[in-house]
Image (cartoon, grey):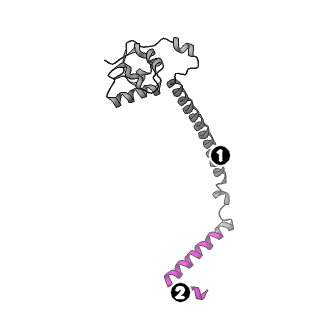
């Protein structure tokens, strides 16, 4: 021990002795019964925290799964709309359209374009994208240049659109 203290200056020796005294005092206090151990026992609150965290995590996991399922079903619905697939095709052809006057395809919003027969959100977005790329439609027939609009679909929507 003497050899260890020889290489230290007086300040370093004082610090080491102080740390040893503090450590010894802590041991004496802990095991002497001077302070009650339950006063510092956090095991119950830790257990409650763990249970709450686990319950919250499971709830968020379930919520996330439901959100993913909703998102996927919306994507499938959009795809079906753009492909003109409907669960009941007979009713889709006979449904009355809610169009008061022809829709100007050069300035219509996606919501307005989606009122057209067979036009879903994706196809409406494609019409707007095509319109922005080309600087607007010069003829109504140009709608057939939009992906997802063929002759059949064009013939269905032709009476409801204009380029004025």
Q: Quadrant of the C terminus?
A: top left
Where 47 falls versus 102 (above or below)?
A: below
> Residue 70 magenta-drawn?
no
Where 26 falls versus 141 (above or below)?
A: below
Q: Which mark is residue 51?
A: 1
> Residue 99's image quarter?
top left
- Residue at point 60%, 42% (across, down): 56
Report which residue position mark 2 lands on. 7
First to last magenta residue range: 1-28
Q: Position of residue 53 (x, y in %)?
A: 61, 46
Q: Position of residue 13 (x, y in %)?
A: 53, 82
Distance CA(mark 2)–CA(mark 1) = 53 Å
- Left or right relative to 37: residue 103: left
Observer-nearest residue: 12 or 83?
Answer: 83
Q: Main secondary structure of the magenta part?
A: helix
Q: Position of residue 162 (x, y in %)?
A: 35, 16
- Residue at point 68%, 65% (across, down): 33
> Residue 12 magenta-drawn?
yes
Where 82 falls versus 21 (above or below)?
A: above
Q: Secondary structure at mark 2?
A: loop
- Residue at point 59%, 76% (across, down): 20
């Amino acid at each position: 021990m003497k050899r260890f203290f020889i290489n230290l200056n007086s300040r370093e020796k004082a610090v080491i002795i102080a740390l040893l005294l503090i450590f010894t005092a802590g041991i004496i206090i802990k095991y002497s019964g001077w302070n009650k151990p339950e006063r510092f026992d956090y095991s119950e609150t830790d257990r409650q925290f763990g249970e709450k965290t686990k319950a919250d995590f499971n709830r968020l996991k379930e919520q996330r799964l439901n959100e993913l399922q909703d998102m996927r079903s919306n994507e499938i619905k959009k795809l079906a709309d753009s492909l003109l697939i409907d669960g009941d095709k007979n009713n889709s052809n006979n449904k009355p359209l809610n169009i008061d006057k022809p829709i100007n395809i050069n300035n219509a919003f996606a919501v307005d374009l989606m009122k057209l027969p067979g036009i879903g959100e994706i196809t409406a977005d494609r019409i707007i994208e095509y319109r922005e790329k080309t600087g607007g439609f010069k003829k109504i027939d140009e709608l057939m240049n939009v992906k997802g609009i063929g002759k059949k679909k064009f013939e269905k929507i032709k009476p409801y659109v204009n380029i004025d």
